[in-house]
Image (cartoon, rainbow, N blue to C red):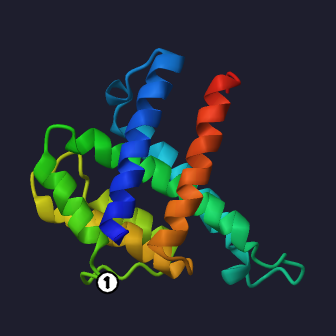
Amino acid sequence: MTNQEMVLDMLERQHKYDRAIEKAHEIQISALGSDRLKAALLDEVGELNHAMKSRWCWWKKTQAPEDRDEVLEELADVWHFALMIILLLTDKRPDCREAFLEGVGYPSAGESCTTPCDFLRGFIRYDLWLTKNTQAFVSAGVLLTDLTRWCGFTIAKIHKAYKKKNAVNFQRIQEGY
């Protein structure tokens, strides 16, 4: 599978999960509002950043080494919420969804993502809720891909981790999470 095919598979899985969440919690994701969705993404980026604390915490001699499995799991959570946002905002804009998938295929489009903070700043800066510019969605795809690479993973690796986490999330629904 190409990177775009794997991300398209994740988008399809996310769409099914979002519908299951809406049914289980009797909500509409589209009614949550941009602030709540951005806050969820912020929280997951924070957890990813914390999982990589050994990369930036210079003041603590006893800092635990980075757990690569934890980093991958937290990155899968970032993808989960980023894809939820992309699906919501491109529901009636297939051109923007295609632009996002196009961005996933780029090695970089000038938006060098060097930390989770850079990813979040860039992803939020484009304020995808307000733009009519498909280039912003290309950039969102690039940022998410660059973050994945910066964390040391490929799209194939995140695809596998995402599918695993997606299955866990569906199980959680069944358990009343």
Q: Name the residue located 37 percent from the left edge and 60 percent from the top edge.
A: 7
Q: Is residue 102 left or right of residue 38?
A: left
Q: Name the residue located 47 percent from the left edge and 14 percent from the top edge.
A: 26
Q: Which residue is mark 1?
A: 107
Residue 41's place in the image compared with 138, above or below, is above
Q: Name the residue located 67 percent from the left edge and 27 percent from the top edge.
A: 177
Label 1's element?
loop
Q: Is residue 147 left or right of residue 54?
A: left
Estimate the x, y position of residue 166 in percent, counting from the top left.
56, 45
Q: Is residue 126 left or right of residue 66?
A: left
Estimate the x, y position of residue 138 in percent, counting from the top left.
21, 66
Is there any visible trace of residue 106 in the rendered image?
A: yes
Estimate the x, y position of residue 5 in percent, counting from the top left.
33, 62
Estimate the x, y position of residue 13 in percent, counting from the top left.
43, 44
Is there any visible trace of residue 137 in the rendered image?
A: no
Q: Is residue 134 left or right of residue 160?
A: left
Of the pair 173 and 57, the residue shown nearer to us:
173
